[in-house]
Amino acid sequence: MIMRTFVYADKFFYTTDVKGPGYLEITDGIFGDFQKEKPAGDVTIIDQSGKWIAPGLVDTHIHGFMNHDVMDNDAEGLKVMSEGLLSCGVTSFLPTTLTSTKERLRDVAETIGNTYQEVPGAKVQGIYFEGPFFTEEHKGAQNPSYFGDPDLDTFHEWQEASGGLIKKIALAPERKNVKEFVEQVTDEGVVVALGHSNATLEEAQTAVEAGASVFVHAYNGMRGLNHREPGMVGALMSLKHVFSELICDGHHVHPNAADILMEKVGHDHVALITDCMMAGGMPDGHYNLGEFPVVVAEGTARLESGNLAGSILKLKEAIKNVVEWEIATPEQAIMMATWVPAISCKIEDKCGMIKKGREADFIVLEPTMDLAATYLDGVERYTA
């Protein structure tokens, strides 16, 4: 006999509205119906009075955590990342690569493809290839010696190695062969993102018209807005039907700039990401991002040059930050860290919402937006 379980809470954040107070049924790790009345009969009630229930957070741009980096090409490290991310409220993620050799990227894709179903914590919903088709002017913490023009044969080699797991790939619109590449991989169901780029508005628009639909960490690693040449920032602000990733740690983007983006394109077109590197969840000190040494101190990760090198942001902090900065409501903050990243990467059939019949991956929040607990498949896996 299946024991029926219900979660009681003050608020439940659905995709289109907020319900509650009431009871959400969970059976065998799957979401059931929501009801306002206390369920009758022999049932288990998980009492989260005074708290809020939201979908598990979805981090679609993350390089590392807990002293492990995706580019380490280490299956055990990926499992440690997965487990650790539950403490960030993250229940689904896209392990994210860095620019490297063609061979190294193929090996990493293959390792993730062979391992992703074995991870014990946050679920791997695909791979994000950040690069290597970038340009040097805005290289960030990417190694320009590996930069090149988009090549379909190379991409297909990586995709085959991954078992079809690559969900998103980023490139700079000003490289050669971009239009043909974007049209083809988009047709294959892969999301193309634009970033680490000195492209003009026109170059970005050509890539978007070919099918590109996401801008990589808005404002960072891209040509800024100029009144005579709107550039990449002007493109993400003005082009239709595109999403923008945004790092809301207070270091990468000023809260006012984040607010301007949200006001211009709508909260439903901004995906909160972390761009977290291996020092996430670790003490200050010396680490690496890919091949580069990084110093972590005072809330930032920086190269020896002083440039930012990814972040140590936890996604649970990003949703709290945007509410405290008064640039998003709790509903909008949660949407930007669940449904928007999922839909922007075409993984919304797997994660990003509370819906009957879906795997019961959810978080419990205090009204202060602090994380209280993380549930995976209806089982509590992390308690603050």
Image: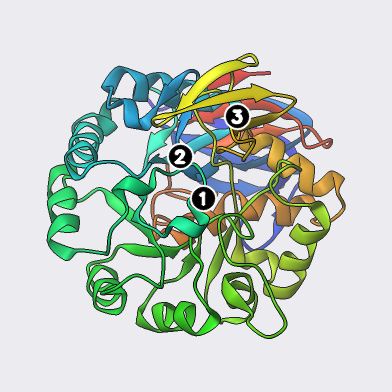
- What is the C-alpha distance between the residues marked 2 and 1? 8 Å
Is residue 348 visible in this depiction of the protein?
yes
Q: Are marks 2 and 3 in contact (CB under 8 Å)?
A: no
Which type of secondary structure does the marked residue at label 2 adopt? strand
Which amino acid type corresponds to the residue marked 2 in the rendered image? Ser
At label 2, counting other C-alpha atoms closer than 10 Å, the crowd grade (few under 14, some 14-19, many 20 or more) is many
Q: Which quadrant of the figure contains the C terminus?
A: top right
Q: Is residue 273 above or below residue 180?
A: above
The image quadrant where one finds the N terminus is top left
State the residue at coordinates (76%, 40%). Answer: 320
Q: Nearer the viewer, residue 362 or 241?
A: 241
* Way the structure is coloured: rainbow
Q: In the figure, is residue 179 to the left or right of 255?
A: left
Number of other residues with Cα within 10 Å of mark 3, as a class: few under 14, some 14 to 19, many 20 or more: many
Residue 257: give x, y in percent of width and height: 77, 60
Location of mark 2 (residue): 92
Report the residue marked by disc 3: 88
Q: Name the residue nearer the viewer: 44 or 361.
A: 361
Q: Position of residue 52 (x, y in %)?
A: 73, 38
Identity, as a three-letter code, of the amino acid under mark 3:
Cys
- Mark earlier in primary sequence (2, 1): 2
Name which residue lies at 63% across and 23% down. Answer: 296
Instruction: Give me the residue at 62% from left, 70% from top.
Output: 233
Q: Which mark is residue 352?
A: 1
Residue 327 in the image: above or below residue 310: below
In the rendered structure, the answer to whether residue 187 lies left or right of residue 264 reads left
SS for callout 1: loop
Question: Residue 236: percent from the left, percent from the top?
Answer: 59, 72
For the residues labelled 1 and 3, the Cα–Cα distance comes to: 15 Å
